[in-house]
Image: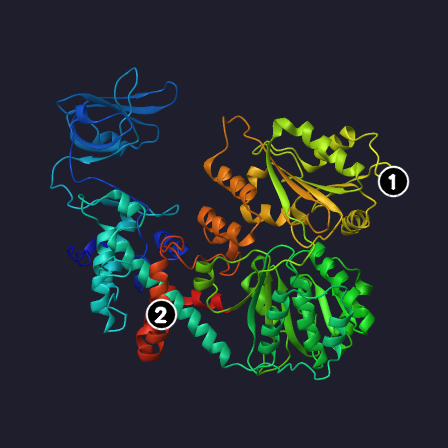
Amino acid sequence: MPKKPAPRTDDAAKEGVAGSAGDTKSPAQKALEKLGLKRDIDLALHLPLRYEDETRIVQLTEVREGQQAQIEAVVTHQEVTFRPRRQLVVTVDDGSDTCTLRFFSFYGSQQKALAVGNRIRVRGEVKGGFLGRTMLHPSFRAAGGSLPTALTPIYPTVAGLPQPYLRKAVLSGLARSDLSDTFAPGDLEVLRHGIGHQPLWTLRDALSFLHHPTPDVSLDTLMDHSHPAWQRLKAEELLAQQISQLQSRRERAALKAPQLQAVEGGTLHARLLAALPFGLTNAQARVGAEIAKDMARPIPMHRLLQGDVGAGKTVVAALAAAICMDAGWQCALMAPTEILAEQHFRKLLGWLEPLGITTAWLTGTQKTKERRAMLALIESGEAQLVVGTHAIIQDKVKFKNLALAIIDEQHRFGVAQRLALRNKLQHDTMEPHMLMMTATPIPRTLAMSYYADLDVSTLDELPPGRTPIVTKVVNDHRRDEVVERIRGQIAEGRQVYWVCPLIEESEALDLTNATQTHADLAEALQGATRADGQPVLIGLLHSRMHVDDKKAVMGAFTAGLMSVLVSTTVIEVGVDVPNASLMVIEHAERFGLSQLHQLRGRVGRGAAASACVLLYSTGDAPRLGEAARERLRAMAETNDGFEIARRDLEIRGPGEFLGARQSGEAMLRFADLATDTALLEWARAEAPMLLDRYPHLAHKHVARWLGGKAEYLKA
């Protein structure tokens, strides 16, 4: 095992690092806080991005071009030149060869340190060239003194926080931190034999080593986090997350919620079932029963309803709302965009209005008079169901008795927004039931970690009549063929989406904008007619349009009056036009995998054979990048949203799925859900045992790792 770190140095003490008492904070202290380094343990857990090897000196003749190296040499020449720009040029000789050092930014003190005749130690990247070996802005100091025995850490930093200061601060924080074991006492022996066949180090040994690893270590194991020291940190981090999730679940179990019993004899719920123009799938019936059972309990439901695109989540939500309204309480459904909220509103209105249910509609773009009328309906309780955007959670919205809050595409809302909706039940001791929905299926490892505090229901069956979508990956050079395919679909009476990633021209990204594409398609399809002989209408939809214009365009397309809709990603979710059979996604290489799958799900909703064309461009590059190729390959190979989600997790990490769940805070800094399944399984089993038998250790462990971040998991 490595040696323990050196005790706190006098220099470090003088620096006034995080955790020390003081008067006015220095700029460096403020910079530390900007990095989130407020406690000693924060400093100890601030790990290097990379390392430099200053433990040995090499001869210039041994160094290959492009290699980082440390040499010891004598300055033989120094001058300030002004071509092509002002620079300090220094020549050094180590006895085997010479090297030119160039500095485009320098001070008088540096010129003095680099005076001719001085012997210096220099480290940097050695480059070749016509004029010989060169280093640009290398680090240097006077030669002499012993060489370090460990690699030099390079830490993530911000402006105003130089590496030497940060190294001292980290060393000081590490020395002062309480790094005693917080695992169950009986487990320590088991841990020494390893989790997932990796023996675990002590926490102090692991951190000391990762801050100052010995030069004989494999850098690959440090950088890919497979070294035993990393395994200890990942085990600790996953355990903290699991304990925090379990605490959140148990705290919620101690709260009260309205008991929403399905009424015997079947009033609204049974009437809604009977009125639906289709039967429920087995998956919808099963999930509906799970939700009904939750709402009948006196503790708040906290359930995530996940289902692939088109699996029928809205009807499950409607049936849950019916149970709530049957019991005499109000229900709210919040969606992230006005288009999606309106889709829900129209569907629910069509199902529930004939049954005598009053539904209110709330968005940020409503006229004052209409909004005032809706607010009155909500406050009086006359509006039993409220559908809208984030306007629902504004202070002026007063519910009479909200008992069920449904959030669609929940990952697109922040923690504060979800908590605000939860607090709309005007009751001191009760909270509403929460049903969160997502069309992005959650991979198993993600459900086990970030969503461990939720009950998860899965719609794993598509309604009958849905046609499989054929996906083709097509180079932009074949654009004319795609336009001809569109002409053919229109002639058969079908409708087409064409999705673009930008509205306006961008200097940074040379992408065709939606406006230009709309004009190009209008010209290319000039003279084309629909199956009924009517001329072809091509619509344009993007986020900067006035809300009334958006509604008019969507209304015309939904009604079948418009054959082609050119749009940005505002149609990603919620749009349901069964007659649309072709989706073209321009510059598909720029979209995330989850977003591509969502867009593809806008077709295949009727009986007609449907297709999705992923139109890609390599620009000036000879071919697509590896990540883009992987995304497009995954789309072409499978329509299964769960497989898409698994591959997306591999390619992009958990951010795509979590959205704002942690309000921008990454709850896992070190563990990798794709590779650390064994550690995650161990942490899941360990958390309840530690919390039940050693609660003081469990709380200490969570405080060490998460601090205040654990609150983010409660929304």
The amino acid at mark 2 is Ala
User: Secondary structure under badge 2?
Assistant: helix
Colouring chosen for the image of the structure: rainbow
Label 1, label 2: how far apart the Cα atoms are: 64 Å
Q: In the rendered picture of this protein, how many numbered marks are placed on residues?
A: 2
Please tell me whether residue 50 is drawn above or below residue 47 in the rendered image. above
What residue is disc 1 on?
532
- Residue 91 on image: x %, y %: 22, 22
Residue situated in front as seen by the camera: 16 or 331: 331
Residue situated in front as seen by the camera: 589 or 128: 589
At horizontal 26% and vertical 51% (from top left) the residue drawn is: 227
What residue is disc 2 on?
685
Q: In which quarter of the image is the N terminus?
A: bottom left
User: Secondary structure under badge 1?
Assistant: loop
- Residue 632 on image: x %, y %: 54, 40
Quadrant of residue 134 in the image? top left
Is label 1 in contact with label 2 (beta carbons under 8 Å)? no
- Residue 680 on image: x %, y %: 37, 62
The amino acid at mark 1 is Asp
